[in-house]
Every structure is written in C-alpha cells, then in structure tokens.
Amino acid sequence: MKAKSISLISFFAIMLMAKASLAAEIITFEDFKQELVMKEHLVKVADNAIFLFDASNSMNKPYKNTGQSRYEVAVGEFKKRNAYMPDLGQNFGLYLYTPWKPIYPMQPYERQKFAAALDSLPPRGDGLTLLQDGLKKIEPVLKTLSGDTV
C-alpha cells in the first residue's frame, strides 16, 4: 500500500461525509471543530463502507521522509478520521487481507468500537500482499449487503 492507499482512505472518508453542495470537498477535523460543518449539513452517499487493509511486509517501508512506515501512516490516518467521522447510520467493515482477518466485521459504525478495532491492528506489517485472496474472501460479505457500498 503506497500513497495511493492512503489516498483511498481519504477518498472513502470523503464519500461518507460529503456535503450536499460540494460532494467532493475534503472535510477535516478543523471544519467540525470550528463548526464550519455540522452533522446536519452532511448527506450520506453510501450505506456501507468496506476497508480492505494491507498489513503486508511492503507496508513497513518508510513513507516519504515522515520517519514513519507506510503502515504507521495508514493506521494513523484511519485513527485521525475516525475521531471525527459522524455517525450517519452507515455500516463499516474493516478487514486485513494480508492475511485475511476481520478486524471490524460489517456492522453499524460506532466510533468507540471502530477505534478499539483500529487499536487491535498488528503493530507492523507481515507477510505477502495477496489482494486477490482478500477480494475472494470479501465476496460473501458483499452478498449480504443492501444499499450503496464503497
């Protein structure tokens, strides 16, 4: 998972928190803190969000010149966004695909439960990057969902 994967996390967060007038505007913690954006301003554009998380060896490589690994940055971004993700009645699922492991099996999003799930992630990446296996294993989960899924 390179910078593209971190961008995907941001993209999914944007998709779930899009404002009605500007569906692609990035909404930050500061927007909520300064009350520039309120939960009432948001429109749920997806009913379900599935995050396939790469916890392979390749994620242990340094991320730019941050002093952190790609893995640490990705986990940190998840935690930052979870801290202000509004509950709009969406379902979340967080799954490691390296190796396959449900971390937060598909269920209604609850900030504290999702934070605990993020805290349960392994401390670093290990193993091979086998996305195709993860895609096969997520298929039964997809079959149970209704509504729009990202």
Image (spheres, helix red, strand yellow):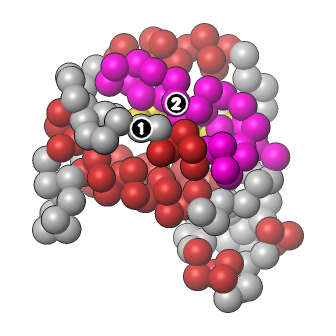
| Residue 99 part of the magenta-drawn span | yes
> How packed is label 2: few (under 14 Cα within 10 Å), some, or many (20 or more)?
many
Q: Looking at the image, is mark 2 or mark 1 earlier in the sequence?
A: 2
How far from the left and from the top, in percent, is residue 89? 82, 46
- Which residue is found at the position 41% from the left and 18% from the top? 100
Q: Is residue 51 above or below residue 38?
A: above
Say what amino acid the circle numbered 2 marks. Answer: Ile
Q: Which mark is residue 121?
A: 1
- Which residue is found at the position 30% from the left and 53% from the top? 72
How far from the left and from the top, in percent, is residue 10? 48, 57
Of residues 87 and 27, the one nearer the viewer is 87
Q: Which mark is residue 95?
A: none
- Which residue is found at the position 45% from the left and 12% from the top? 136
Distance Cα–Cα, label 2 vs label 1: 7 Å
Q: Label 2, on which residue?
A: 103
The quadrant of the rendering that contains the C terminus is top right
How far from the left and from the top, in percent, is residue 90? 75, 43
Figure quadrant of residue 31: bottom right
Residue 14 appears in the rendering? no
